[in-house]
Amino acid sequence: MGQGYGKDFESDEGVNVSHQPGIHELDLTRRQVFKCSGAAIAMLMGSHSLGASTATGKPLGFTPVPVSTSDTLVVPAEYIAEVLYRWGDPVGSIAGAPLFKPDGSNSWEDQSLQAGMHHDGMALFPIDGNPRHALLAINHEYTDDGLLHVSGMSDWSANKVRKSQAAHGVSIIEIIERQGQWHVMPDSRFARRITANTSMLLSGPASGHDLLKTAADPIGTRVLGTLNNCAAGDTPWGSFLTCEENWNGYFSSSAQPTAAEKRYGLRHKGWGYRWHEYDERFDATKHPNESYRFGWVVEVDPMDPTQTPIKRTALGRIKHEGATTTLAKDGRVVVYMGDDERFEYLYKFISRDIVRPGGYAANKTLLDHGTLYVAHFEANGHGRWLALVQGENGLTADKGFATQADVLIHTRQAADVVGATPMDRPEWIAVHPHTGEVFATLTNNSQRGQPGRGVDSINPRADNIMGHIIRWREGSAKGNDAAATEFRWMQFALAGDPNAEQTEHRGNINGDMYGSPDGLAFDAGGLLWIQTDVSTSAMHQGAYKNMGNNMMLCADPFTGETKRFLTGPRGCEITGITFTPDRKTVFINIQHPGETASERSDPDAPKAVSHWPDGPQGGRPRSATVAIRRKDGGMVGT
């Protein structure tokens, strides 16, 4: 995911420096590790078949688009793409909400009623089961203050901080399709903005812990805001899970951060957002506990605009890349999560109780009770989920884990102790809708292969700038129960350019090339959608010189065939994917079009890289949600 000022800042601050051992017993041959044949996949999946047999219509039945460096969104000839909701558009909750001003002169009060900046993960919630009428919940990850304000970060002020905070968080909008085109509904009773200053609750085992108490909240149960909301998820009971990723970059620690602060990447003056200069709760020297109140999964009921968002501490405190849910065989909910940083881990949470009918009201405490696990991969293609439970697996008081709250607040340190496998930046996770097989993107890790950070069978490439996608099946060959504590894994694809000069960057792509896989989702028919996030500092050069702009691809998970479905405008990331239930529209997000290598735009030349989506006459590039559909009204991807 885009990470704002510091996206490419991945030094040993905030990176796992525990040197947790990976998989050293490389008893799989290179061919076994790298190749996913149809027979091998069928063996992994038992009697289930994927992709081709479960998708309705011809899989990948579209004309793939070529690599592009143009400043436009390119989709197959048989499709149409329409911009739905851009940064600065009215959220739709108040009549006469302020319109976007192309020169960036909207006030912070305006911004709190408009679409936030840098759209990311999202989810669709049909109203009364109607696939043409729904709520759309959209994350706004971070801000480019060079674009957000008239004069960028010069003349920095309290009002600029407030505007930046108002551009973070979540939008919930009501949308409807009329005569084939999607529209945002004005004056919707559902529509609202959630920002970095919205009141929220802390619930679950860590709620009320001493480290969550502040002068403003001496009980430790309420916090203002959510930020750096990256990927997301939805639940079987209809709520939205928005995930706090690089929250550490907003805090300024002392010149010498504590060991706990270092483990989560806090540093002096943060990543350059400068919030601490006018909002002292982001100054960790003055309010050392405030940072512990971020790094959680936040649950929102999109159907109730009066509901207070809730940070669910039972799901652990990490740099959450997403929260993908599925059901265990006995009806309990399982939540998969990645911690997006080099050498961090994959997690899953299994609820104590089963999902009950009755929507959010009947399940509003379900995510407060259960067990959090972290993944350990073995070289023989097997793996185990290790429980992060106080008193088990070495998580004892003498190691700093006196209570379960200690385990959840210091999730990374707990995972170090139990023996989790360090991964190459775990990002999005997707569960096949028919077989239950799980896929995860590992975006990249240029430090893999350095001393003490050797390659292994699950992370098989040194200097892994291209990334890869893994897959696993929970439990035994026949069981495949998401609540299992063992699994069997394989590689799905090593990303890369088949024509790259260096063989380690070529990958084993069965179809169109790509690099830095990030967003990942299945549609209801079983097709796998892959979105890329090549950093602007790496794009169009070196091993990436032939790949063009970031893109979205579609893959058949049974055959591995992959086709490029779209390419984005210059400087953007492709992210945030969700489908209508009938698969006739897919919504995606174009994040930070026009981003520069420094990731902070020049306010005097806002269109230096891109002028998407408003064109040359627009004031500056704008992140946006796009609705894509087939011209003939058929299902997307087939």
Image (cartoon, rainbow, N blue to C red):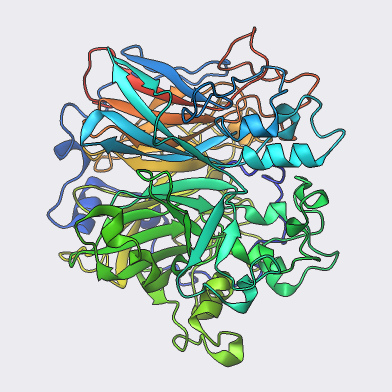
Q: Nearer the viewer, residue 19 or 163?
A: 163
Residue sitting farthest toward the bottom: 398
Query: On the rendered structure, is 332 left or right of 163?
Result: left
Across and down, in percent, residue 223 comes to 59, 60
Indicate the position of residue 384 as horizontal and vertical percent values. Answer: 36, 72
Q: Quadrant of residue 475?
A: bottom left
Quarter containing the C terminus: top left
Residue 488 drawn at (x, y percent): 30, 64
User: Quick check: 370 above or below 118?
Assistant: below
Front-most of residues 476 and 369: 369
Q: Residue at x 21, y 63 (%)?
A: 480
**Can residue 419 be seen?**
yes
- The residue sitting at 69% across, 45% down in the picture is 8
Q: Quadrant of residue 325?
A: bottom left
- Above or below, 119 relative to 369: above
Left or right: where does residue 588 sit relative to residue 351? right
Residue at the outermost top position:
617
504 and 381: which is toward the camera: 381
- Residue at 21% over, 20% down: 634
- Residue at horizontal 83 percent and vertical 39 percent from the top: 157
Vertical arrangement, residue 441 with respect to residue 550, above or below: below
